[in-house]
Amino acid sequence: MKRIYLSSILIFLGLVFCATNLFAQTKLKGKVVDATTKNAISGAKIQKNGKVIFISNAEGEFSIDCEAQITLSVGFLGYQTSTINVEYCEEFLTVSLVVATENLNEVEVVSTINSDKELLEKPVSQVHLTTRELNRGLGLYLDDVINANVTGVTMQRRAVSSGQQFNIRGYGNGVGFRGASNNFDGQGYKVYLNNIPITDAEGVTLMDDIDFGSIGNVDVIKGPSGSLYGLAIAGVVNLKTIRPEKNKTSIGQSAMLGNYGLMRFTTTLQTATDKTSLLVNYGHQQSDGYMTHNSSKKDFMNLIFDTKLSQKQTITAYFGYSNSHDDRGGELSKEQYEAKDYSGNARYIKNNAHSDVVSFRTGISHKYDFKNWISNTTTIFGTGLTSNVSSAGGWTDKDPINYGLRSTFDFKFNLTQNVSLTGTAGIETQQQLAQIIGYSMVTNPKDSLGYNIIGGVRSNQYSNSRTSSIFTEWVLHLPSDISITAGIGSSNLKIDLENRLYNANSDKPTNVSANYDNMVSPRIAINKVFNNSVSVYASYSKGYKAPVSGNIVLSTSGELNTGLVPEFGNQFEIGSKGSILNGKLNYQVAIFETIFENKFTSVAVPLDANTTAYTYIANGGSQKNTGVEVLLKYNAYQSETGFLSGINPYMNVTYSDFKYDNFKYQSLANGEVAEVDFSGKAVVGVAPWVANAGVDFNTNLGFYGNVAYSYRDAMPFTSDGENVTDAYSLVNAKIGFRKTISKFSLDIYAGANNLGGTQYYYMVFLNQLPDAYLPAPKGTQSFGGISLKYNF
């Protein structure tokens, strides 16, 4: 009995000793940050004895059990792994990781894969841009950044700061007058700003009112993305505004000046605690433009507020306002461009061609973590916009209102010790109410030599468009770092149009409708990771692009364009991405083939032997896009003590072999309707070869800079292949100095784009001769600026 009693006492004392040690164990707390920008790194792995013991949270923070004299390894894809010898557990540890590449960092994608997963585990071609890429040049025009850093994607703009459009792997524009793509709107892709759709309910994307100078990071997903985003046949672009630095309060003022009348002034107030943050950003931007009648003037305001209500709940609110005016000088003809005559298009200038957009955009997101295996993020959003646009063809007023919600549930299940299942399921719905009034333009009787004025009403149309998508995507994580992804989405679009222009002699129907239902978009992929540093994947995805309201009504009869069905695309892709050479070289390689079917084409209806009465849209043939994309980033040198702190060269190359297949349209020729066959011709607006290379450098004294080279191959801009642009090359450079002195942070810089004075273009109008080129600046575009911030 005594032995039992003694044994019990010893066991009890042993348990007390163990419990005392357990509860008394010191916690080592710290934060993982980018060595250059000091921004927090979410998803960094903290390892001990080769085993992951913690992953940094959204603020880059970690907390681990600690004992003195331990060695930790801290790493994140795209950064050099850092080895830390811990001497004292009580001290707060800041781990600064040196960038090898930022395009391969953990990508925050709206409601997709959990934020603690690395890009290696994502079987999708995707590029992440941070402030490093966004601020290499002017930092005001997103197309400069996209064209230099994102393989397979081209971004153009119709004026100095308006008419922006993406072309993702050869898809992105509306239907042209001569059977193929044109430049009048952006279609086929979806754009989000802080989880708020910029793309409207019909699938048209207008970005005139976006302040790209306030964007902090960009994620570009290439290829059909219907299993997470609905009607996104070409891809998705997620924009995120800059965010406040945690536990800091500051007020800042920046100014930029450049030739061609460039001015940009930005005032920023930001404050953040552990639970709440607020950023208010105001910007004024203007330019004289690069040709006749090409000036631009914009005012922007952004307000972003975050609050953590509890450990489970977070609310984020966004409010944006913009007032945008861009003059349009019209497209130069081939002859004008070749003669370097930038006097513009007389028809546009006579009509005082311009784009005026005033918009309000707001969204409130609520995230709730129900359990460790399920969470929900719901965003309610609304956009009010009024615009008036004039061009060679007349004047148009449009006042659309878009509103809706996006709600996603994220799941995480541990099925066995080595098998887990993560997934997303959600819904996105949006409605647009818009009135569109078109006017002719006539000579001003009081000033016949001045601009034309608004004439009679030519059209008055009210539209009610509703789209909805339900989607889900799941990833099964298997042993040996193998994962299988499967997802599916289903989208619907309904358009109701009301003709409000009374005409007693017309028998056109007053109301027409079109429904496009059950556009099902599957996705499946397999991914394998080798040695935690290299992955290979294969994927298949499908997406849809439905007609817009301008496609579904015949221009003269007003009747429904019966039989028109959505386009769809199937993409097959294999690729690899990784970090090799001890984390110094990061790469992405993708080989894909996308086949678009039911491509929209035009059909001509003759009025008489020599005149086309009108054209309407019908489903034509297909388009086969095959391409190879390669992206490389290298950390050539790093030092915390020498003059140079880092040298980071990069390079990317895109090869595109895009062809029309069984693609035909009708036109009037020699008094008869003739069929034109584009089959086998190269797709317009896509350069076969695009290459970019450059180097970033930083010093420990605060000096920094970059040099960049870009090459764009010649490309056809009419589908018959008869008209081709010239190839061109650009060299850009920027140098600056940043330093924090007491409570002041200073950044001063100067740079120049197109140092060689090469003639090149911002946009080429497709299949619309004689209109052709929208030119970039004739010569070198120089700029300089200063940013001063006071930290309270």
Image: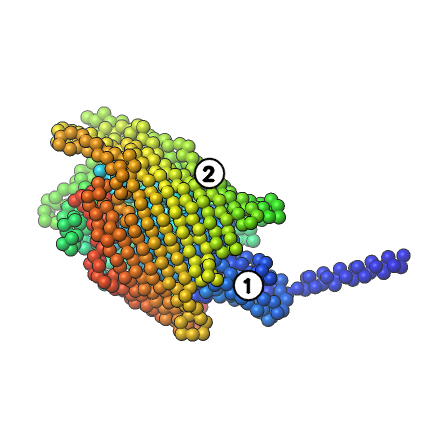
Q: Name the residue that disc number 1 marks.
A: 73
Estimate how packed mark 1 is, as few (under 14), some (14 to 19) or many (20 or more) residues with alpha carbons within 10 Å: some
Residue 16's place in the image compared with 766, above or below, is: below
Task: Specify whether residue 464 is in view.
Answer: no
Kindly identify which numbered label has been placed on residue 613. Answer: none
Q: Secondary structure at mark 2?
A: strand
Name which residue lies at 14% across and 51% down.
336
- 442 vs 617, left or right, is left
- Seen from the viewer's position, the closer of residues 525 and 774 is 525
Q: Quadrant of residue 90?
A: bottom right
Task: Tell me what residue is drawn at x 49 percent, y 41 percent.
Answer: 486
Q: Measuring from the top left, give residue 306's x and y in whole percent.
A: 47, 55
- Which label was assigned to residue 488? 2
Quadrant (top left/top right/bottom left/bottom right) for the N terminus = bottom right
Q: Residue 470 in the image: x percent, y percent?
A: 45, 38
Q: Amino acid at mark 1?
A: Ser
Quadrant of the image occupied by residue 27: bottom right
